């Protein structure tokens, strides 16, 4: 697998110059979706300074009446930043050392993936594999944000299963420093280095070794008919699915030659080793709003009458907590069984569900009238690659890689037009 055929490659990356980097870099748009005060605080902190906040749409605003205005303004800001030479170009991979709030350091590598090597359709086995079921209804509003934008800002994190740390391990102490600054809202810090051509070849060779079909089958004890996974989508499943959808839409109006060289064929991502010591899988809990908590609790009891051992979730409502064990599992994981139950209940009775990081946030939100929370057990990260290879995508919003404040922050940009 040579560089031109590789699903991951160095590319032209745009970085800001002459700006307050702490105000420039903001957390992924799919965080704090039930906490508007977070985004209000960020807006006040950024003020008139150049910021990625002005180029993205926090997802809690996607259903607002002014979303079209927000989308237009975001694209306009991108054009302004490009024309005003606010962004400078570097070529290669960016090695990122992200200090988390608790002081641990997560290492990642920013580059471009070929969307021809990714497919979120059920039953497919591409090198870049979705880890959760894609909710098709979530794609169109995100396509509207991306389709006319001249730039992309990534919050996609792809995982590699590299226990020997062959890809990222040798990168400490290499490269040209690009930035080093504290992140806003007590979210740690970010330090980035440009990785030049000589080291790029070693990285690509190491990645190719992880995707060797025979080695992959032996590592997980799988049948040779199951194709290898090089990258599993850890964060940003729907963001990457949106990039794929926009590219497939372009292919319908471009010639094959034009499509093969179009910048939208690629998406900027950060690659992280599943075995990074800082990487912890956190459960993604549920809070259901606009329902009768008593009615929902009664419906749940109908599914959990025996109290036998099995898949268990904890219901949280008005300061009270109670564990429920399902009589029958409808998914391999408790979170999947719960999700199927909630989907059915909401379809029949109304309500809406939000996906929450952190036990304390669930407990706080479930104090609201008409709200009820569910705490779900976590999934071990060592189970990920083999489970996805065997069963396909996990139930949606099964796990999160850390707390909201430790998520990927927007920083780098890439031209997609």
Image: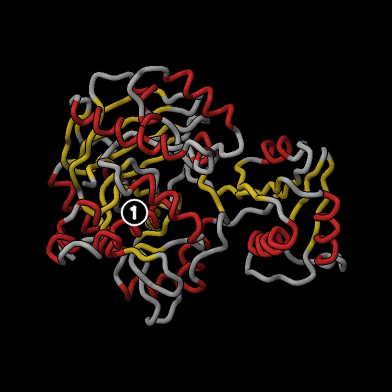
Q: Quadrant of residue 232?
A: bottom left
x, y percent for residue 378 = 62, 53
Residue shown at 47% from the left, 23% from the top: 43
413 displayed left or right of 408 = left
Q: Quadrant of residue 81?
A: top left
Q: Which scheme is used to colour this image of the protein?
A: secondary structure
* Residue at (20% x, 51% y) in the render: 263
Please indicate whether residue 242 sits to the left or right of residue 148 in the image. Answer: right
**Residue linked to disc 1:** 243
Q: Quadrant of residue 21?
A: top left
Left/right of residue 18 with respect to residue 269 in the rendered view: left
State how many labels appear.
1
The answer to whether one can see residue 237 in this image is: no
Name the residue located 46 percent from the left edge and 44 percent from the top edge. 277
Asked whether 316 or 101 is in front, the reply is 316
Instruction: Residue at 36%, 59% (x, y): give it.
Output: 231
Of the pair 276 and 82, the residue shown nearer to us: 82
Residue 354 percent coordinates (x, y):
62, 47
Q: Is residue 251 above or below residue 10?
A: below
- Residue 113 % position (x, y): 27, 55
- Residue 217 at what x, y percent from top left? 39, 75
SS under mark 1: helix
Residue 327 in sight from this viewpoint: yes
Q: Residues within 10 Å of mark 1 (few under 14, many from 20)?
A: many
Which quarter of the figure is the N terminus placed in? bottom left
């Amino acid at each position: 697998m040579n560089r031109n055929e590789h699903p991951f490659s160095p590319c032209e990356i745009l970085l800001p110059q002459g700006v307050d980097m702490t105000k420039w870099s903001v957390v992924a748009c799919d965080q704090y979706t039930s906490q508007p005060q977070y985004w209000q605080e960020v807006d006040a902190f950024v003020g008139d300074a150049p910021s990625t906040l002005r180029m993205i749409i926090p997802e809690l605003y996607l259903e607002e009446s002014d979303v079209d205005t927000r989308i237009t303004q975001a694209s306009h800001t991108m054009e302004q930043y490009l024309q005003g030479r606010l962004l400078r170009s570097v070529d290669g991979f960016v090695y990122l050392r992200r200090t988390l709030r608790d002081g641990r350091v997560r290492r990642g590598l920013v580059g471009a993936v070929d969307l021809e090597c990714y497919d979120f359709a059920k039953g497919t086995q591409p090198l870049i594999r979705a880890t959760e079921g894609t909710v098709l209804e979530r794609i169109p509003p995100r396509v509207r944000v991306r389709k006319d934008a001249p730039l992309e800002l990534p919050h996609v994190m792809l995982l590699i299963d590299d226990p020997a740390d062959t890809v990222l391990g040798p990168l400490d102490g290499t490269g040209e420093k690009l930035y080093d600054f504290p992140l806003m809202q007590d979210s740690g810090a970010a330090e980035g280095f440009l990785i030049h051509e000589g080291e790029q070849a070693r990285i690509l060779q190491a990645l190719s070794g992880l995707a060797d079909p025979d080695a992959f089958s032996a590592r997980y004890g799988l049948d040779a008919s199951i194709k290898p996974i090089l990258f599993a989508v850890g964060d940003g499943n729907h963001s990457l699915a949106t990039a794929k959808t926009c590219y497939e839409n372009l292919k319908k109006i471009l010639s094959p030659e034009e499509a093969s060289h179009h910048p939208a064929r690629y998406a900027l991502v950060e690659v992280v080793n599943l075995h990074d010591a800082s990487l912890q899988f956190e459960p993604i809990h549920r809070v259901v709003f606009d329902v009768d908590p008593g009615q929902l609790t009664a419906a749940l009891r109908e599914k959990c009458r025996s109290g036998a051992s099995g898949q268990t979730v904890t219901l949280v409502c008005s300061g009270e907590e109670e564990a429920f064990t399902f009589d029958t599992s409808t998914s391999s994981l408790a979170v999947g069984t719960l999700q199927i139950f909630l989907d059915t209940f909401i379809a029949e009775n109304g309500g809406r569900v939000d996906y929450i990081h952190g036990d304390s946030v669930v407990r706080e939100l479930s104090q609201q009238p008409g709200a009820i929370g569910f705490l779900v057990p976590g999934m071990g990260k060592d189970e990920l690659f083999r489970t996805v290879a065997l069963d396909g995508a996990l139930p949606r919003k099964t796990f999160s890689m850390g707390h909201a404040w430790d998520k990927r922050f927007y920083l780098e940009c890439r031209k997609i037009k």
